[in-house]
Amino acid sequence: MMSRPAPFDHRPTHSATSPIAFLLVLFVVSFALGCSSGSGGGGGGGGSIDGTWVGKALSSYAISSSFTAKITEDNTKISGTITIAILSYTDEPITGTLNGTSITFGDISGKITFTGTINGNSASGTYSLPSYGDNGTWTAAKQ
């Protein structure tokens, strides 16, 4: 006959480390390490922001337009090109900065400036287009 542990005996009656608990802890630690590793100090919300980003902007005039930015990250500096059909921009050079998850970039001529936040493979923020007296919001996704 099997004896029951005394009421004051708080030892577990089964193994405290099950394979499922171990895998769950391993997943959480791996996820946390993956999110904290940036590329070259820029951060970018968990990885390099290098690549093609496709987005939409909504102006203060309620006009929606799309854009494509090809971005290269070098530590905290970014460069690349942007295409915005509604402004007749095709592969216009852009420069900017990346500080953790905060991003600021714009065309070299200074006509448009984007500021926002990177969160993995998505980004959002505001833009300013002073020559048209316009500003608005934008969202983008890394392709």
Image (cartoon, rainbow, N blue to C red):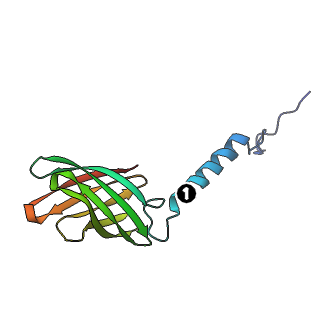
* Image position, residue 93 (x, y; %): 28, 67
Residue 5, above or below 82 = above
Left or right: 4 with respect to 143? right
Query: Which corner quadrant of the image does residue 10 belong to?
Result: top right
Query: Which corner quadrant of the image does residue 110 belong to?
Result: bottom left
Residue 123 versus residue 84: which sits nearer the camera? Answer: 84
Q: How many marks?
A: 1
* Image position, residue 73 (x, y; %): 42, 67
The amino acid sitting under disc 1 is Gly
Left or right: 12 with respect to 54? right
Is disc 1 surrounded by few (<14), some (14 to 19) or many (20+) residues within 10 Å?
few
* Image position, residue 109 (x, y; %): 19, 71
Q: Give the residue pinned by disc 1.
A: 34
Residue for point 76% across, 40% down: 7
Residue for point 60% across, 54% down: 30
Residue for point 78% across, 45% down: 11
Residue 15 versus residue 37: which sits nearer the camera? Answer: 37
Extreme residue toward the right, this view: 1
Left or right: 133 with respect to 31? left
